[in-house]
Image (tube, rainbow, N blue to C red):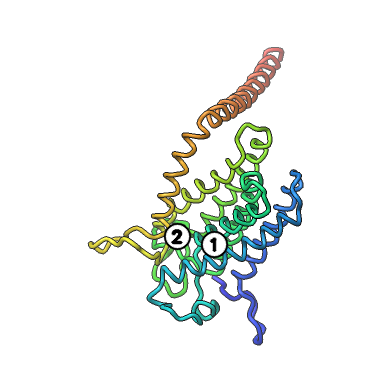
Amino acid sequence: MLPVLLDFKFIKIYTFGIFLVLAFFWGSFLLWRIIRLTSQKEDLIFDGLFLSITGGLFVSRVVYVALNFEKFGFDILKFILINGYPGLSLYGALIGAFISLYVFFLLKKINFRDVADYFITPLFIALTFGKLGSFFSGSEIGSKTKFPIALKYFGYDGFRHLTPLYEAIFFCLGAYISYKLIFEVRRERFRKGFVFYFFCWYFALIYILFDKIKANPLYLIPFKSGQAGFSFNFILSGVILLIVSVYFLINFRSSLLAYGKIAYKKITKRFAGSFGDRSKKSAKTDRGIEKK
């Protein structure tokens, strides 16, 4: 892996930093493109974006320091000097960003549900670039595996899962799904806020699936037998997944069933059409053979 992309002696350009810049620019560009579909003011939306990034970074650092308190203690300098004492919590960043965004729109007297859905696809894209940065820089390491698709990292024994790359692929898929869902919300097949709740559910699901194949997670509930326990991300993801799943069943059950029926009809029509075309072609070829 390549932690430092370019070293000019007087300054170093880190691989992860480059991908964070790409995440910001592509996420911002996509937000600008999507928000043009609405009547919301672009400058107001981007004010909320910059505030949410600031709040997300602060809460992300606070959560990381709290979870690793034995390394930081009450030393304010260690909290501030992120280059010397690196570490951020992704869950902390998301919680801080969403709370900041909610408070900002509350003060501007804008319903959070009216705009929250439009932030989700850009957020998925930003997460995709962030995870790609973690993969190429080697800042996130997978657990040991005998799976054929694996990498050997410097300083770690054995071959390792490509965990951040797997997550990047699923986040990219989440961006595609959420983009499609935005138009379903605009057609009023789903209520406003559905895409936001989908993000919470999908993100929690991805973190539950891949938490066990990450190296060096912080276990809040370790097993006494020496086996891996439950990490902070795993516990929080499980709680969020359960709550949002119940919320979906209570509030969006009819909408999900209706959308599922429409999607099922479209899929069956496509399959029926493709099989019909094949049967027609085979019939024509059979007739041609008979004539010969």
Foreground residue among 103 and 258: 103
Q: Which residue is the site of mark 1?
A: 93
Q: Position of residue 206 (x, y in %)?
A: 48, 51
Residue 153 drawn above or below residue 259: below
Q: Amino acid at mark 1?
A: Ala
Where's the N terminus, which quadrant?
A: bottom right
Near-viewer residue (56 or 272):
56
Q: Position of residue 146 (x, y in %)?
A: 39, 58
Which residue shows up at 62% across the image and 58% down it? 126
Viewer-side residue, 251 vs 213:
251
Q: Among all residues in the image, which is located at the extreme left?
A: 225
Q: Which residue is denoted by mark 2 in the rendering?
A: 161
At 61% from the left and 49% from the top, the residue drawn is 120
Toward the top, the furthest residue is 291
Q: Position of residue 178 (x, y in %)?
A: 61, 44
Q: Count numbered badges in the picture.
A: 2
| SS state under label 2 | loop
Which residue corresponds to the image point at 43% horizontal and 69% vertical from the top-left? 66
Q: Is 39 situated above or below 161?
A: above
- The C terminus, quarter of image: top right
| Amino acid marked by disc 2 | His
Residue 86 x, y percent position in the rendering? 51, 75
Q: Residue at x 66, y 58 (%)?
A: 49
